[in-house]
Amino acid sequence: MASLKDVGSQKDVDAASSSGQPVVLHFWASWCEPCKHMDTVMAQLAKDHPSVTFMRVEAEAVDEVTIKYEVAMVPAFVLIKGGKVVEKLEGADPAALSDKVQALAAGKTANGAAGAAAGVAVPAQAQAQDVQGRIKWLLAQHPVLLFMKGTADSPSCGFSSKVVAALRALQVPFKTVDILADEALRTGLKEFSSWPTYP
């Protein structure tokens, strides 16, 4: 009998993807009641589709995975095939999730995100709202969050390097987000902070 597997890091997702089976990630939070219901749905789908790996990601605890897949709310679902995201779903919608999982198991999903696979253009305004939502969610998860160029161990600009050094000197726990890896986020931050440039 198939069961839901808890993700502890991105390595867990990569290992599951490398097995050759499609993967479904359920991003959840302990305070989210709809997530509990969707766990039941996921368990049933796991029984119905043994050729698919079903995994749970505690969004606030495994933030490297949450950020990588650009999850801005819970419950949210990311469907992966061949190591690439082929579908995404936000919200507690058992029927929609079931349809997407059935298509994934049958190999019918396109090699791209939901919406793009169906040839539907996402309005620029909707994209902007999504980015602003991601920024607010990220800020809510961490007392100190540094949007920087590069990573804490390998900064890509002098200003980012100085900020990291200052935070470490003060022994302040902090998380970082590499804005060079996400142009939409980088642009959205300028609008969010009403500042024309970003380090």
Image: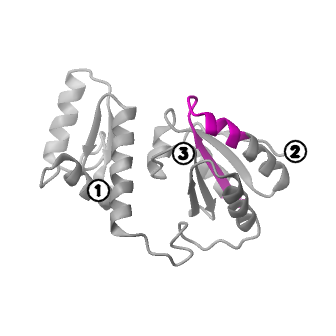
Determine crowd level at label 1: few under 14, some 14-19, many 20+ residues with C-alpha closer than 10 A.
some
Q: Which residue is mark 2?
A: 1
Residue drawn at (14%, 45%) of the image: 158
- Say which element carries label 2: loop
Provide the residue span drawn in magenta: 18-39
Instruction: Give the farthest residue toward the top.
Output: 171
Instruction: Pick whichever of labels 2 and 3 is earlier in the sequence.
Output: 2
Q: Does 126 sit left or right of 161 as displayed?
A: right
Relative to the observer, which residue lies in front, 123 or 187? 123
Determine crowd level at label 2: few under 14, some 14-19, many 20+ residues with C-alpha closer than 10 A.
few
Q: Which residue is mark 3?
A: 10
Q: Which mark is residue 180?
A: 1
How much space separates mark 2 and mark 3, taking CA atoms? Answer: 24 Å
Please state which amino acid type lies under the numbered disc 1.
Leu
Residue drawn at (25%, 58%) of the image: 187
In the rendered view, would you say 96 is above or below 30?
below
Q: How is the image coloured?
A: one colour
In the rendered view, would you say 61 is above or below 73?
above
Residue drawn at (81%, 56%) of the image: 49
How much space separates mark 3 and mark 1, taking CA atoms? Answer: 20 Å
Q: Position of residue 113 (x, y in %)?
A: 53, 66
Please state which amino acid type lies under the numbered disc 2.
Met
- Say which element carries label 1: helix
Q: Is residue 115 visible?
A: yes
Relative to the observer, which residue lies in front, 66 or 123? 123
- Say which element carries label 3: helix
